[in-house]
Image (cartoon, rainbow, N blue to C red):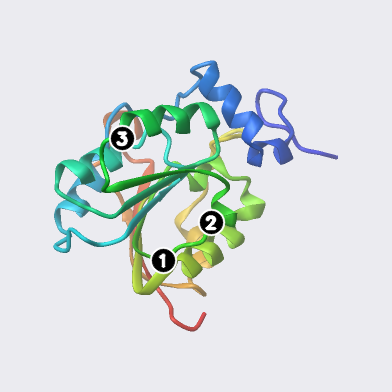
Amino acid sequence: MVKSNKDGIKMESITDSTYWETQYQNKNTGWDLGMISPAITLYIDSLKDKNSAILIPGCGNTYEAEYLLAQGFTNITVIDISPTLVCSLIKKFSHNASITVILGDYFEHDGVYDFIIEQTFFCALPPALRQKYAQKMNELLTVDGILFGLLFNRQFDLGPPFGGSQKEYQSIFKSKFDILKMELCLYSVAPRAGSELFIELKKLAFP
């Protein structure tokens, strides 16, 4: 039996650009905070090298990129699968050479990054893709590269979003990353308080 999400959408279609294109065209973007998460702001503020290569996959409206640019970071790449969204971002950032906007599938992306930011991308993927996600993250990071951001520490009905637990995430990432931090987020926005984990994962060179 093919599983469907709460709207009757087949799981397989969630990884297809048509699904996400429809969400943006219909402005059905309930995952969008309208701002950068305070926890991600704090981590960015701790980064010293403004020339670090930073990737934001499944970037959405990418308030994270806006914040990075405002702080003087010069090597930012964002990628999303929705043409409507990406067209909007290209226009928005058209005069800023410090950011590259890509329309495409994260799993087919090639690049090398010092940091990758996770913000509501992992939870948008069907759980069957989580090991593939961890492997791809490892491949995209430099030696000692860091994946940081937020994961939901709760379960949902058929998604997206798809939830999970710290125990589950540890089993997914432990073979590809040194788990420097995976703990209850103390700086979540009010609607997500108590339901997020902050992660800081360092690439393992020989997974």
For residue 148, the mark is none
What's the mark number on residue 93?
3
Q: Nearer the viewer, residue 98 or 55?
A: 98
Q: Quadrant of residue 54?
A: bottom left
Q: Position of residue 70 (x, y in %)?
A: 16, 41
Please rate how many residues cluster around mark 3, counting C-alpha atoms within 10 Å: few if below 14, some from 14 to 19, many from 20: some
Q: Which residue is mark 1?
A: 112
Q: Residue at x 54, y 16 (%)?
A: 26
Residue 172 seen in the figure: no
Contact (Cβ within 8 Å) of mark 1 with mark 2: no
**Residue at the extreme top:** 26
The residue at which mark 2 appears reads as 109
Amino acid of disc 1: Val
Given the image, on which type of amino acid does mark 3 rest?
Phe
From the viewer's side, name the closer residue of 135 and 157.
135
Tell me the distance, in whole angstroms, between the alpha carbons under discs 1 and 3. Answer: 22 Å
Q: Is residue 169 left or right of residue 196?
A: right
What residue appears at the point 21 percent right and 54 percent down from the top-left corner?
43
User: Does 45 sit left or right of 170 as displayed?
Assistant: left
Work out whether 175 lies above or below 47.
Answer: below
User: Label 3 near label 1: C-beta < 8 Å?
Assistant: no
When the figure is inspected, residue 141 is found, relative to residue 54, above or below; the finding is below
The residues bearing labels 1 and 2 have C-alpha atoms spaced at a distance of 10 Å
Q: Residue at x 20, y 52 (%)?
A: 73
